[in-house]
Amino acid sequence: MTDIRIFDTTLRDGEQSPGASLNHAEKLEIARQLEALGVDVIEAGFPITSQGDFDAVSAIAHELTKPIVCGLARCVPRDIDRAGEAVKHAKQGRIHVFCATSKIHREHKLKKAFEQIIELSQHSVEQARGYVEDVEFSPEDGSRTELNYLVDITAAVIEAGATTINIPDTVGYSVPEEYGHIFAYVREQLPIIDEKGIYLSSHCHNDLGLAVANSLSAMQNGARQIECTINGIGERAGNAALEEIVMAMRTRADYYEKYNTNIDISKLYPTSRMVSTLTGLQVQRNKALVGQNAFAHESGIHQDGMLKNRNTYEIMDPQTIGVPESKLVLGKHSGRHALGDRIKQLGYTIDDDTLNRVYETFKALADKKKDVFDEDIEAMIDTTLENAAP
Ligand code: KIV
Ligand code: ZN
C-alpha cells in the first residue's frame, strides 16, 4: 500500500478565490474541521501577505496537533522569516517555498536567468531549513517548465534540504498523460528521490476541468502527496477538489487498489457545507459528490431503477460521505412509481385507480412548475379523494 498525503490548501489557495474571505475565527474553525477530516498537511496561509494571515497560521500552528501545519513563502528572505515565525510553535511545522521556473515567468515576471533562479531557490530552501526540518519547494508553473530544468532545480533544492518537491500545474494547462509523465521522468532521472524518501507532490488548477484527473495521473506516476481544496475552491477555476480525489480513489478501489489516504469520508459533506457557508462561495448544484443534485434523481426511468435497486443509478451510498439521503425529485420527468412511493412515505394508502388520477393531475402541474413539493401532492390526493367521495 502507498499512503498518499492529502495536503489541503483551502485556507491558502482556496482563500485566494475571488469572492472568498475568512476571518480569524472562521479560519480556525475550518482548520479544526480539516484536522477531524484527517488531512495530513494544512497549508494555513501565506504569512507575509498580512498580519491577519500571519496570526491565523500562527494560531493554527499553536493549536493543531495531528497535521503538519504549513506556511507559504516566496524566495524572499523576509517571507521565509515570517513563515518560519508563524509555524514555529507547530508540533510539525513546514515552510513551503516557491519560485517560478517556466520560460514565460522567467522572462516576463522574474526577469531572471534559470541559473539565478536555481541559486535563489537553493538559498531560500537553506534559509527555511534554519527554521524547520520539513521544507517543501515548488517550481511555480512547473508543468510549463522545460523538463531538463525541472530535473535540475529538483536536484538543486533537494541538495539544499527540501524534503517535498511539488510540481504545480499553476495555470491548469496540463492534460493527464502529460502531467503524469513529468513525475515519471523526474523520478527516473533522479534516483535520489526514492533513495532519500523525498515526497513528490501534485498541485493542479482546474482551468480545463482536469485538475482531479491530473492529480490522479501524478499519483500513478509517483506523487505521494496531493494538494487540493474543499469544494475545489481556489484561484480562477479553482484547485483539484479534495472530496473528488478521495472518493475517486475509494469508489474505484479496484483500480486504485495500491493507494490509501487517512481521510474520514463520513466528514466530507459536513466539511463541504462548512467551507461553503464560511467562505460565502456557493457549491454549484451539479458539483460531484457535494452539489445539491449529486444524489438527486428526477427522470422516471432513473427513479424507477433507484426504487428497484439504488445501484442502478448511484455509484456510492451518499450516507457514507455524510449526505443525509438520496432524493427522488418529483418533476415533469418523474414516473408513477416514484409518485406512488412518495405518497406512501407521506402516510397515504390509495388504490391504483386513485394513483392514476393523482398522477394525471401531477403531470399537468409538473408541466407548469419545476418542482412538485410534498404539500402539492397532499393537496392533489385530498382533492382527488374528495371528488371521488359519493
Ligand atoms: O499554483 C501554484 O503554482 C501555487 C504555488 C504557490 C504552489 O499555488
Ligand atoms: Zn495554486
Image (cartoon, grey):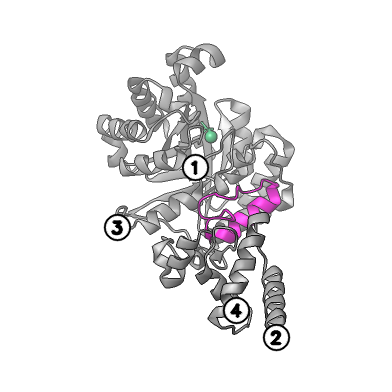
- Going from N to C along the chain, the mark reached first, 2 or 3, is 3
Q: Nearer the viewer, residue 146 or 389?
A: 389
Q: Nearer the viewer, mark 3 or mark 4?
A: 4
Image quadrant where residue 102 sits: top left
Residue drawn at (46%, 39%) of the image: 211
Q: Which residues are magenta?
A: 269-297
Q: Is mark 2 within 8 Å of ligand 2?
A: no
Image mark for residue 389: 2
The residue that mark 4 highlights is 354
The residue that mark 1 highlights is 240
Q: Nearer the viewer, mark 4 or mark 2?
A: 2
Give the amino acid type for the residue marked by disc 1 in the picture: Ala
Asked whether residue 147 is drawn in magenta, I would say no
Q: Nearer the viewer, mark 2 or mark 1?
A: 2
Give the amino acid type for the residue marked by disc 4 in the picture: Thr
Image quadrant where residue 165 sits: top left
Q: Nearer the viewer, residue 228 or 353?
A: 353
Image location of residue 3, percent across then percent down: 36, 53
Considering only vertical position in the picture, is 127 above or below 52? above
Give the amino acid type for the residue marked by disc 3 in the picture: Asp
Considering only vertical position in the picture, is 331 above or below 354? above
Q: Nearer the viewer, residue 124 or 56?
A: 56
Alpha-carbon span between mark 2 and mark 1: 59 Å
Q: Is mark 4 within 8 Å of ligand 2?
A: no
- Going from N to C along the chain, the mark reached first, 4 or 1, is 1
- Dot 3: what SS? loop
Q: Please state, as top left, top right, bottom left or bottom right, where the N terminus lies in the image.
A: bottom left
Q: Is residue 54 visible?
A: yes
Q: Nearer the viewer, mark 2 or mark 3?
A: 2
- Dot 4: what SS? helix
